[in-house]
Image (cartoon, rainbow, N blue to C red):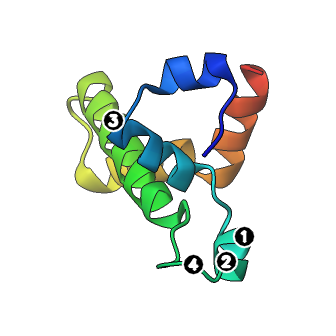
Amino acid sequence: MILPAVLAELAGTGADLAHLEQALTHPSFANEQKRGPRVDYQRLEFLGDAVIQLCVSEALMRLYPEAREGELSLLRSSVVSTEALASFAKSVE
C-alpha cells in the first residue's frame, strides 16, 4: 500500500498498516480483487460500533446513575443512531 508521507507517519509502520489498508477498503473493491481472501472494513466497522456503544453506555451510566436499563437503552440508541452520529460528524468537519 502506498500512502502519502504524512499519512504514513500518522499511521505507523508494520502491522498498523495492514489494519489501515483494511479500514480504507470498500467491500465492493475487495470483492472485485482476485487476490487472496476478501479483506474490507466491515469487520472493523463491527468492532468500532461495539466500542462506540460501550463508551456511550459507560457515559450514560455516569450521567444518569438512577436510570433503569430500559431508559439507558433508549438513550443509547438515540445517541448512537445513524442520524445522530452523522449530525455529530458534520458538526466537527
Mark 4 or mark 3: which is in front?
4
Asked if the residue under mark 4 is in contact with the one under mark 2, i.e. CB atoms within 8 Å, the reply is: yes
Report the amino acid beneath label 2: Gln
* N-term mark: 3 or 1: 1
How crowded is the residue under tag 1: few (<14 C-alpha within 10 Å), some, or many (20+)? few
Question: Does residue 26 appear to the left or right of 37 in the view shown?
Answer: right
Q: Earlier in the sequence, mark 1 or mark 4?
A: 1
| Kind of residue at badge 1 | Phe
Q: Which mark is residue 12?
A: none
C-alpha gap between disc 4 and disc 3: 37 Å
Residue 4 seen = yes
Q: Are marks 1 and 2 in contact (CB under 8 Å)?
A: yes
For the C terminus, the quadrant is top right
Q: Nearer the viewer, residue 15 or 55?
A: 15
Front disc: 1 or 4: 4
Mark 2, residue position = 33
Tag 3 secondary structure: helix
Which residue is label 1 attached to? Answer: 29
Q: CA distance from mark 1 to mark 2?
A: 7 Å
Q: To which quarter of the image does residue 16 belong?
A: top left
What distance separates the C-alpha of mark 3 from that of mark 1? 31 Å
Q: Are marks 1 and 4 in contact (CB under 8 Å)?
A: no
Q: CA distance from mark 2 to mark 4?
A: 6 Å
> In the shown orientation, is residue 10 left or right of residue 60?
right
- For label 3, the residue is 55
* Camera-side residue of 73 and 12: 12
Q: What kind of element bears circle 4?
A: loop
The kind of residue tagged 4 is: Arg
Q: Which residue is mark 4?
A: 35
Instruction: Give the x, y percent position of residue 8.
Output: 56, 25
